[in-house]
Image (cartoon, rainbow, N blue to C red):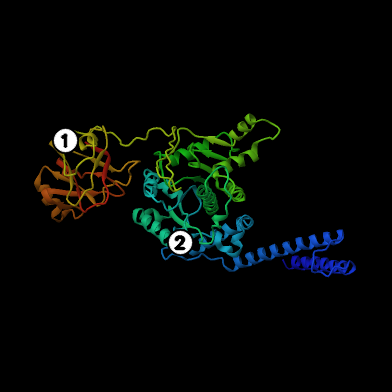
Amino acid sequence: MRLTHIKLGCILACAFLSLTWLTAHNGNDGDEPPNHPVMIQLYERLLAAEFKGELLSRELSSVLTSLRNLTIPNNSSSTNIPEGPIKRNLSLLSSRLPNAYLYLPHLRDHPDSLIPNVVLGQGRTGVSLVLGIPTVKRQKQSYLVSTLNSLLYDLSPSERNDTVIIIFVAETDAEYVNSVAELLEKNFPKDVHSGLLEVVSPSQYFYPNFSRLRETFGDSKERVKWRTKQNLDYSFLMLYAQEKGTYYVQLEDDIVANPGYSQTMKTYVRKLATDDWMFLEFSQLGFIGKMFRASDLPMIAEFFLMFYKDKPIDWLLDHILWVKACNPEKDAKDCNLQKGLLKLRYKPSLFQHVGLHSSLPGKLQKLKDKDFGKVPLFTAHTNPPAELSSSLKHYQQHTLERAYNGQDFFWGLTPTAKDFILLSFPQPRTVTRYLFRSGNIENNGDHFYNTTVSVLPSDSSVRDRLVGGQSPQYKGSYGGFIVIGCFVDGVAEGQIDAQMQPISALRLLVQSDSDMWVLLSEIFIQL
């Protein structure tokens, strides 16, 4: 760097001396631009050298500042990330794409603006699947919690350990960013603390001045700003995600996922006959469900940043395919054929758009993926005859009887403490196992919370014997019942001790008021 400064200084000095000599010999007092051809050429070279010198100076200053500040901006007291690996990963973020300062020159004044503010997370890396979800403050309804409920609904323990879901809150309002983090930590505490869920946001200096954008393609100024910011948001998220896993899937904050989506995507990738693809499509709508190799993200993000002010992001993605695959000397049909070899489509679609209100104020988004198919909302079982009763009021046709008989799911209005569901057997039965699953893929937030499972032994002396101290793991409940389990993450399942057999009834009892409705998508009583 020092030699470069000396070399540039020599060029400037020689150019200045030559210009001074020519000026003196042509009667120019130096206050006006030179008019001699040689002088004009030297003058232009001087200006070019001066510009390069200024640019180099800024770049060197940026590098030095970055070297001095390889730490995370600690803007939130709720950050849960180990210091060592995060510093290493986030410093890579700004160094992996130095050209960002050319496309976003306003960042030169704040060189740390490419380092995200990590609000929640454990710095998880080395996973197979990274899911990126940008979200913004919406004027109408927020779908984020429902989207995460859908994505987490049936992930197995091994899949949870092999996945990172990054929520990118694309806002610079620290109060709003922290409110989103608090909402997710409240609703998904285990997933946040395990490192499965992360919440990040951009620096307050990341976004440029959107008031200077040129209106194109007949779009309004507001829409041009919206699509431009979206380009920057997706680019920022991709740059952050590149070091975390093998494959990156771009999602939105208002979708529903098909059960088993994680394993389906991994299986599809493994079975592909070729590795020449650039991205895989697991939904036909916009940018939803697009899978990339994480190693390709820097190139893709840089292309987006080069043209972020010019076109929407799905158009830019198509242009990357054109650059890679199309021969200008051939026709559009051949071009589309070649592009089709780089983007492969999986059917049926694994993700469906469900949000009605777009993040663009005033826009209604009614598009649906016709290839998504119908998602099963309940699991049917053949259960033994029982008399059913409940203090919960059901919604529309979603009755307890239909759910128990495998015809529908049960959907009850907001429960309060002491609400119950009771299954009474006409004759005492030996029941070996039970399973109650609450919520479904579309309404996964409608869980049973703080709700116990209890049984009524046909022999009343059993309760006295088990609850009276011989089996301290059992607790009594009113009406002669024995508590044998409870709902955890929306599911209650287990074996029934042989000492309690036969039983006369099985009861779900709500222990506290809830803010949500309740939904039973699976009831299984095994004899």
SS at circle 2: loop
**Position of residue 441 measured from the top left corner of the image (x, y, whole percent):** 35, 41
Q: Which mark is residue 499?
A: none
Q: Amino acid at mark 1?
A: Ala
Q: Residue furthest right?
A: 25
Decide which of 128, 57 is in the foreground and name it. Answer: 57
Quadrant of image for the C terminus: top left
Residue at 25%, 38% (x, y): give it.
524
**Residue 309, position as x, y percentages in the image:** 58, 50
Give the mark, 2 or 1, whose residue is nearer the N terminus: 2
Q: Which residue is mark 2?
A: 81
Q: Give the SS element for disc 1.
A: loop
Instruction: Identify which residue, 26 or 246, lies in the foreground.
Output: 26
Q: Residue furthest left?
A: 460
Q: Amino acid at mark 2?
A: Ile
Q: Residue at x 63, y 38 (%)?
A: 322
Where does the image place residue 111, in percent across and percent down from the top left?
59, 63
Label 1 crowd bin: few (<14), some (14–19), many (20+), radius 10 Å: some
Left or right, 235 with reference to 256: right
- Name the quadrant containing residue 44: bottom right
In the rendering, which numbered label is found on residue 386?
1
